[in-house]
Amino acid sequence: MLNANTRIYTGFSLIELLIAMAISISLITALISFVSVNLIGHSKLIMQQRLSDELHSIVSLIQSDLNRAGFDATSALQYTLSNNYAAAFANSIELSAFPGEPVDSCVTFAYDRDMDGEIDAANPNERFGFRLRENSIEVRQRGLLCDANGWQDISDSSVIIIDHFAIQTLDENGSNSRLAVRIDASSKQIPSIQRRIQRHWQISNEH
């Protein structure tokens, strides 16, 4: 017999517990899905920015170096002394390609780095260049030819894949004073992320 001070405690039924568990699992699943989508979106934004930054850095380096093409520190003096002076660095830009790579995906050039009016093959070597090889952009070392091994990567192959690289001369008179560069690249981690960058500019030293 129950007295006045007796309390009856009742808990959840099995069905109520199952319903509560199902609701909790649904909420947790939705939360995980929401977080995952946001993490993926954030990762894509980071990769897009890294790809853009890498491309801009590469193109800026190429443009900066090519702007020096044909520079001869002694040309003004030599022209004063002789009207027939042929500058050693004039028209030094040449386009070709590493075997198996697209046409005009290698550019070589020279400029008077030590300002002595002569193209030096020793230190400092004054023959420069950039090329595409195996989905990477490389910089010329020791004056090597376009078809030689030994060039050095300047694109980070752990970040980007170079799908296209080409240099184009825009002058119709045969000079190389106006150039265009185009690079297409994709993210190594997320290939669907792709970027293209193009630049056109005038080179004052080439004649």
Image (cartoon, rainbow, N blue to C red):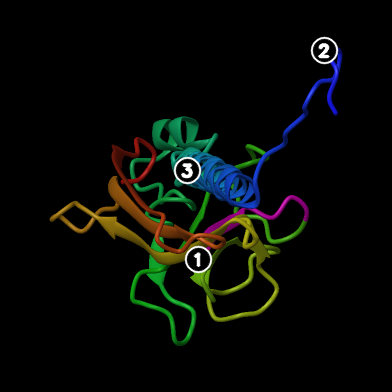
The residue that mark 3 highlights is: 41
> Tag 2's secondary structure?
loop
Q: Which residue position is annotated with label 1?
A: 131
**Whole-number angstrom distance, CA of label 1 to CA of label 3:** 34 Å
Residue that sits furthest to the bottom in the current view: 100
Judge whether residue 57 can be spotted in this image: no
* 10 Å crowding of disc 1: few (<14), some (14-19), many (20+): many
User: Which of 179 and 44 lies nearest the eye of the viewer?
Assistant: 44
> Residue at point 50% right, 39% down?
38
Q: Secondary structure at mark 1?
A: strand
Q: Quadrant of residue 8?
A: top right
At label 2, the amino acid type is Ala
Q: Is residue 18 above or below residue 73?
A: below
**Mark 2 or mark 1, earlier in chain:** 2
Residue 207, position as x, y percentages in the image: 31, 46
- Alpha-carbon span between mark 2 and mark 1: 95 Å
Whether residue 205 is visible here, answered yes or no, is: yes
Q: Amino acid at mark 3?
A: Gly
Q: Position of residue 183 (x, y in %)?
A: 38, 56
Rendered position, 158 above or below 7 = below
Q: Earlier in the sequence, mark 1 or mark 3?
A: 3
* Residue 170 percent across, percent down from the top left: 20, 52
Vertical comparison of 155 with 100: above or below: above
Point out the stretch of residues depicted in magenta. 123-130
Q: CA distance from mark 3 to mark 2?
A: 63 Å
Check if residue 165 falls in the magenta segment. Answer: no
Q: Nearer the viewer, residue 103 or 44?
A: 44
Residue receiving disc 2:
4
Q: Residues within 10 Å of mark 2 (few under 14, many from 20)?
A: few
